[in-house]
Image (tube, rainbow, N blue to C red):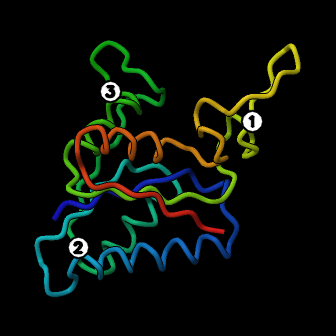
Amino acid sequence: MKIGIGGPEEPGWTREQKEKVKMRIETIFYYHGYPQESSITLLSGHCSGVDIWAEEIAKEMGIKTVIFKPQIKQWHDFQLLKGYRSRNIDVAKESDVYYDIEPEGSCRHCRGTGLEVSELAHERKCRYCKGTGIYSGGTWTMNYAKKLGKEACQIVIS
């Protein structure tokens, strides 16, 4: 079972939320059969925050880890170097199941309000979070995994 886990980077989390995330990650591994199921593999995008916490917990539990580290720190590829987008696609394609773990109000595009305000002062739903106020690269990866027909879900931490 290849389990992808992702979410936003560390600066968006409180200490209490971080502890809740770590407990959820452990729960995910147990849900998928740890310790009896020895074929569990964590797939990680290796960003600070959720990705790194999942890697640390997997290591502590003796779970295999495959890391998809971007070759360049930008969304799009540059020449032959893979950026965040291609890295996220690789994680989604390789995962049997993908978990996006998010704090409430994580969408940096609307600052968690769920609304965009245009120059003409018109409010409309944020095109990234679709009005939920919750969105990160982990959400993008979850949505991509769903398009591929993969099992994927979002866990929101208050």
Q: State the SS at label 2.
A: loop
Residue 58 or residue 8, whichever sits in front: 8
Question: Could you say which is closer to the camera, residue 27 or residue 22?
Answer: 27
For marks 3 and 1, give the one nearer the viewer: 1
Mark 1, secondary structure of its residue:
strand
Q: Amino acid at mark 1?
A: Leu
Q: Residue at x 23, y 39 (%)?
A: 148
Per the image, label 3 sits on a secondary structure element best described as loop
Q: Which mark is residue 63?
A: 2
Query: Which residue is identified by label 3?
Result: 82
Establish if 86 lies above or below 92. Answer: above
Quadrant of image for the C terminus: bottom right
Q: Earlier in the sequence, mark 1 or mark 2?
A: 2
- State whether residue 74 is above or below residue 47: above
**Label 2 vs label 3: CA separation?**
26 Å
Q: Which mark is residue 115?
A: 1
Q: Residues within 10 Å of mark 1 (few under 14, many from 20)?
A: many
Tag 1–tag 2 contact (CB < 8 Å):
no
- In the image, what residue occupies the spot 73% across and 28% down? 124
User: Would you identify the image quadrant in which residue 88 lies?
Assistant: top left
Cα–Cα span, label 1 and label 2: 40 Å
Residue 154: give x, y in percent of width and height: 46, 58
Q: Name which residue lies at 47% across and 31% down.
A: 73
Closer to the chain start, of discs 2 and 3, is 2
Neighbours of disc 3 within 10 Å: few (<14), some (14-19), many (20+): many
Mark 3–mark 1 Cα distance, whole angstroms, equals 31 Å
